[in-house]
Amino acid sequence: MTDQSSPNSVHHLEPARKAWVEAMALLLRHKYLILLTSIAVTIVTIVYMFFIAKVWFKAEANIVPARKQGGLFDNITAGISSTIKDLGLTQLAGKNKSDGVYSPLAIVGSRTVGEQMVRDYDLVKVYETENVDDAIKEFGEHTSVAVLEEGNIGVSFEDTDPKRAAQVANRLVGMLNEVNSKLANDEAKFNRSYIETRYGKMIADLDSSEKALGAYQRKYGVYELKTQAAAQLSVLSTLEQQRYLSEIQLASAVQLYGAESPEANTMRTQMGELGKKLEDLRTGMDQNAKSYFPAMNVMPDVALDYLRLTREVEIQSKLKAFMLPSYEQAKMDENKQSLSFIMLDSAQVPFRKTRPKRSVAVLIAFFGSIVLTSLAVIAATRIGEARERFRHDRKILGV
């Protein structure tokens, strides 16, 4: 282990110790300059902070989003509203919109609110700016919106006038509700226009489907397909049974009375009539039955087309029942005034300033001036010594 008190170690630390001693000696030689400079800077800071600098007061209003009161229409239209929003038709406020409330930060930072507040409180004159745009920019620098730990929202404003600070903070809450209502109404108007267009097309489609179904029913005599098909099959079954019985009776008459007997001829005539009746029902040629029985040879196609037409009518009818409440809700929302935020605590006139922190500024000025003046003295001395060495070296070299 190297002995820290050895001559080599002392010799190694000697330049650092020498520089430290020289720096301290230099600062002690200029202690009055450093002290007077620091006192002067501190006095200037005190004068500026206590007599020149503006004193700012901050007022804060505490608000929470209003709970959405769901009604009959709200429950019915929840599905279509979600669908419309998924299509991007209601994203006027960005991703921070939820439960019908737009982002308070986006609203407070908007030009609409800033311009209104500048006009209401004559902030161009207050801020001594050249135009409204500069006043809006400075207004934004003194306005803040923050979500607190409990979930409520703090809307704050700072001003040199404590009364105006409280007035502006409370007015900002009112502007939040006004702008939210306007945006919600604009959104409802857009949704109403969209739903109205879609509703009109749906009504036209429903009317077309109903007319097509009616024409098809008149053409083929189909009014209740299942009932009619069951009745037709029942008739066909009865006729088939009667023809089968006639065949048996014909065979019996031939055996008992002969093939050319009146009884046999009667049974043959009856069988012919039954066969013709069955064929007419299958081909749709029966003049008495075709008005209410579709022909059996076209029954599959008729049934398929009939089902398609009735399905289209049912779909359009369900769409009508689904969209009508949404349409009525959109018309109601278009002119509805809603309260988006509820004031928990209104902004009160502040009695304590928020800035500047005078004591902190004075302490920083005092100790900061000591440090900076000391560094300036050391730097100036080192620069002077470097110049002296440079002149000395030039003299020796004869340059």
Image: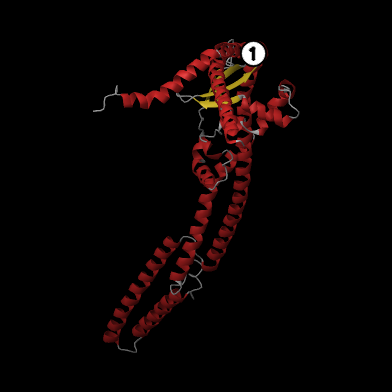
* In the image, farthest residue toward the left: 1
Q: What element carries label 1?
A: helix
Relative depth, front residue between 116 and 281 = 116
- Neighbor class of circle 1 (other Cα within 10 Å; few <14, some 14-19, many 20+) is few
Above or below 98: residue 24 = above
Relative depth, front residue between 33 and 384 = 384
Relative depth, front residue between 270 and 258 = 270
Query: How many numbered circles does the render carry?
Result: 1
Residue 256 visible to an observer of this rendering? yes
Q: Position of residue 296 (x, y in %)?
A: 43, 72
Q: Which colour scheme is used?
A: secondary structure
Q: Position of residue 179 (x, y in %)?
A: 63, 31
Residue at 62 percent across and 12 percent down: it is: 40
Q: Quadrant of the N terminus?
A: top left
Residue 293 visible to an observer of this rendering? no
Horizontal side of 145 relative to 231 (left or right) equals right
Above or below 136: residue 27 = above
Residue at 32 percent across and 80 percent down: it is: 247
Residue type of the residue flagged with mark 1: Val
Residue to which mark 1 is pinned: 44
Q: Where is residue 19 in the image (x, y as percent from the top left)?
A: 46, 23
Q: Position of residue 175 (x, y in %)?
A: 63, 27
Above or below 356: residue 267 = below
Residue 118 placement: quadrant:
top right
Residue at 52 percent across and 17 percent down: it is: 26
Q: Quadrant of the C terminus?
A: top right
